[in-house]
Image: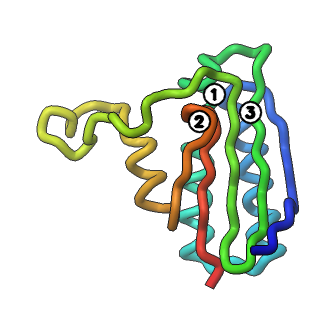
Amino acid sequence: MNSTTIENLIVPSNLASVSIVESLIDRVCANLDVSEDSYGNILIAVTEAVNNAVIHGNSFNTDSSVRVDVIQLDKQLCFCVSDEGKGFDYDNLPDPTAPENIEKESGRGIFLIRNLADDVIFDNGGSVVNLYFNRA
């Protein structure tokens, strides 16, 4: 499988960095002629992953940063979001659709990411999330 890193970005660990990542997504999707539907999924899933990296991974620590790498594969586009945190147990998260969680204001990020990306692979104990989107 051929892969090429086409963009990478390191942003400070604050929520204002999300707009910088949105610009990266806009640029990559425009350059690769990504469909409108795929663009929407990429925008929501990747910005949610960046939010999680800032809030949960780096705990808003301004000395930490978030890295986003965009990798072009034969049939997919991968956005790799890395933080400097210790990771998390991504296999044992509460179900946000369960009755006891439906009213909660948080806890939907990974659920959203998993539903919008075509594949999601966590590395480094959860401090790295790879979001794959089919290009076809």
Q: Secondary structure at mark 1?
A: helix
Q: Looking at the picture, which amino acid does disc 3 mark?
A: Val
Q: Is residue 88 left or right of residue 100?
A: right
Say above or below: 37 vs 48: below
Q: Residue at x 80, y 34 (%)?
A: 11
**Where residue 80 sits in the image (x, y, percent)?**
69, 49
Look at mark 3 in the image and give the residue it sits on.
66
Q: Residue at x 75, y 80 (%)?
A: 33
Is 30 or 89 nearer to us in this picture?
89
**Residue 116 visible at all:** yes
Q: Looking at the picture, which amino acid does disc 1 mark?
A: Val
How far apart are the alpha carbons under marks 2 and 3? 10 Å
**Where residue 79 sits in the image (x, y, percent)?**
69, 55
Q: Is residue 116 left or right of residue 106?
A: right
Q: Quadrant of residue 25?
A: bottom right
Q: Residue at x 41, y 59 (%)?
A: 115
> How would you rate the neighbour count of disc 3 (Cα within 10 Å): few for under 14, some for 14-19, many for 20 or more?
many
Q: Which mark is residue 51?
A: 2
Q: Looking at the picture, which amino acid does disc 2 mark?
A: Asn
Q: Which mark is residue 94?
A: none
Tell me the quarter of the image containing the C terminus. Answer: bottom right
**Residue 52 visible at all:** no
